[in-house]
């Protein structure tokens, strides 16, 4: 039976697909960026660092998982949960580096130094790399996830109509089990009562 917690799978398909793509970019781009001299040190593709793991791969995986949940679910609650997971991943892309450095006082987890390119100045390349891999990417993920939360929270008129139509069809179904009185005739119907013959056998006195 349809209820208001169920939604069409297409409700979160577009936002979920965008979150999957953005999560993949955020998780993998720092590892592949050295191929194009774009990103942050070390200048070696697919090299592992704690900064790439905690500041890129994990929030990217969170956005990716949230997008998958939104893409396949027909539950309003699961869709909103996936979108919230995407918001958390995007927020970590924006503020994760500063939080680790300023609050946790951990200097071993860092994004590294910007890679140098002959076609751009160091300041411009640093800004573009941070925008593409961290704060700009995180803002875009938060925007898409927040849009998805709004779509999942929206109670569309067709949702209400589907619930009402389903409730009407359920209530209009005939009863499967007839009443007991119709299925089993009464005793009086099977054995009719005998006629009262007392007055016929014994007439009243004085007649």
Image (cartoon, rainbow, N blue to C red):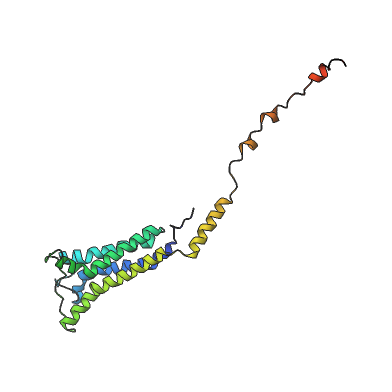
View extreme (front): residue: 206
Q: Is residue 62 visible?
A: yes
Q: Is residue 48 visible?
A: no
Front one among 151 and 128: 151
Q: Quadrant of residue 59?
A: bottom left
Q: Please state, as top left, top right, bottom left or bottom right, where the C terminus lies in the image.
A: top right
User: Along the horizontal axis of the image, is 109 left or right of 164?
Assistant: left
Q: Position of residue 124 (x, y in %)?
A: 19, 82
Q: Quadrant of residue 89?
A: bottom left
Front one among 17 and 164: 164
Q: Position of residue 30 (x, y in %)?
A: 21, 70
Q: Could you tell me which residue is drawn at 36 percent across and 69 percent down?
A: 147
Compared with residue 127, is residue 7 higher up or lower down, i.e. above or below?
Answer: above
How many tags in the picture? Answer: 0
Compared with residue 176, is residue 52 higher up or lower down, i.e. above or below?
Answer: below
User: Along the horizontal axis of the image, is 179 left or right of 42?
Assistant: right
Q: Position of residue 16 (x, y in %)?
A: 36, 65
Compared with residue 158, is residue 177 higher up or lower down, i.e. above or below?
Answer: above
Q: Position of residue 174 (x, y in %)?
A: 60, 47
Q: Could you tell me which residue is drawn at 32 percent across and 71 percent down?
A: 143
Q: Quadrant of residue 42?
A: bottom left
């Amino acid at each position: 039976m349809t209820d208001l917690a169920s939604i069409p799978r297409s409700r979160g398909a577009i936002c979920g697909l965008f979150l999957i793509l953005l999560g993949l970019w955020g998780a993998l781009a720092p590892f592949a960026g050295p191929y194009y001299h774009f990103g942050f040190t070390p200048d070696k593709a697919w090299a592992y660092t704690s900064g790439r793991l905690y500041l890129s791969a994990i929030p990217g995986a969170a956005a990716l998982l949230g997008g998958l949940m939104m893409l396949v679910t027909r539950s309003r609650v699961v869709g909103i949960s996936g979108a919230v997971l995407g918001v958390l991943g995007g927020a970590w892309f924006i503020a994760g580096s500063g939080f680790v450095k300023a609050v946790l006082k951990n200097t071993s987890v860092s994004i590294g130094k910007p890679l140098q390119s002959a076609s751009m100045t160091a300041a411009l390349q640093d800004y573009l790399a941070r925008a593409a891999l961290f704060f700009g990417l995180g803002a875009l993920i938060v925007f898409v996830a927040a849009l998805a939360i709004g779509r999942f929270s929206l109670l569309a008129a067709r949702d209400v109509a589907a619930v009402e139509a389903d409730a009407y069809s359920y209530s209009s179904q005939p009863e499967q089990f007839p009443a007991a009185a119709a299925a089993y005739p009464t005793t009086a119907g099977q054995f009719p009562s005998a006629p009262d013959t007392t007055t016929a056998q014994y007439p009243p006195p004085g007649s």
